[in-house]
Amino acid sequence: MTYLRNAALALACALAFSACSSSSKGSLADTAEFCQALSTAWADKAAACGPIDGPAYASELAFMLDCGALEAAEAAGGFTYDRAAAQPCLDDFQALDCAVFDRTEGPPDSCQDAIVPRVAQGGACTSWLDVECIGGFCDFTACNLPGTCQDYLGQGEDCSASGRCQDPLYCNGSTCVPPTPQEEVGLGESCGTGPVRCGGGLFCDDDAAVWVCAARRTSGACGSDGACAVGHDCVDGTCQPERVVGAACLQGAYECVAGLWCDTSSRCARWSGVGGACGAMTNGEYAQCLDGWCESTGGMSIQPAIALPGTCRAFKAVGAVCDDTPGGQSWMQCGPGATCLEGTCARTYCGRS
């Protein structure tokens, strides 16, 4: 089994909330609809290209997006949503094949036209996503709202503090440097060393004495999901068809795709909503919650090794009492864009600058 991809990374890369499924084409009248559509669209693409459950991943993405805070940022004049510019982005995003999507660092360039930042350097900002600051990012080094717009750093500038490098530069040690260009190589060609990557439908096979690009497999040995073709997962060291909702599974073996668990009837099942079971199940499986947090009878840890079966609860509102004891799931119980500070849910963006 694989775990859900890092939602925060996916969304930071998404930048301008620029994706939508075909079902929502033409209906994105405002930022709220655009924001809600993104979680489903990005998750659908991820599910089509890898072993992950779309609805479960959409729930993770929606949590990270914090659509309410996004609407507030727009209302405060932080950015302008250009509905007319959204359609080319939607078309370009849907046209991505899995080989491109799997190595993308964000949506197509056309997507950046849908969100127009309006805050200059030094101005107040509220969204951790790059939507408000003109040519820069929102720095939340003080943790609580509002943040301050700062310019991106250029090549050779010091990035050891809180500054962020201008795309496509990245912080190497303490300096913004450009990425090393990668050459795409084909079937049977050498890989694993140097600035090369295998082309679409291939992976770098490290089982041989000399690593070479090989076709992703529908069966046979594998060391990771990357060795398996689309629609397949690496289970117990072999590429097998993905175990999606309703598929037979072995309890306690974590065979279902990310976002599912093997229930007591030995079938892959989706995580529960509010009121359902979550945490470490009695059959050795583990489940999180859709659109909520897991309150466990043995504490609120999300680690299967120490959690006990619990119940999915609705997110708590800002200002509500919460549990911030060590090991508690404080970052989840207060919902999107909030965390538990000294026993109370509060808006905070620590670590997101």
Image: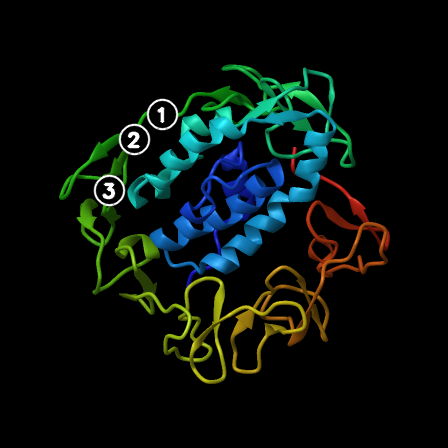
Compared to residue 172, the image places residue 65 above or below, namely: below
Question: Residues under labels 1 and 3: Cα distance?
Answer: 20 Å
Badge 1 amino acid: Thr
Q: 255 left or right of 302?
A: left
The C terminus - image quarter: top right
* Residue denoted by label 1: 180
Q: Quadrant of the N terminus?
A: bottom left
Q: Which mark is residue 195?
A: 2
Q: What secondary structure is found at the residue carrying circle 3?
A: loop
Question: SS at mark 2?
Answer: loop
Amino acid, disc 2: Pro
Q: Is residue 161 visible?
A: no
Quadrant in the rendering for residue 139: top right
The mark closer to the camera, 3 or 2, is 3
Lateral position of residue 136 relative to residue 253, left or right: right
Q: CA distance from mark 2 to mark 1?
A: 7 Å
Picture residue at 57% right of the left edge, 46% below the top: 36
Disc 1: CA contacts within 10 A as few (<14), some (14-19) or many (>=20): few
Q: Nearer the viewer, residue 191 or 246?
A: 246
Q: Earlier in the sequence, mark 1 or mark 3?
A: 1
Residue 23 pos. (x, y %): 44, 49
Residue 176: % across, % down: 51, 21
User: Do residues under tags 2 and 1 come within 8 Å of each other at their CB atoms?
Assistant: yes
Query: Mark 3 is on which residue type?
Result: Gly
For the residue pair 85 and 253, the one nearer the viewer reads as: 85
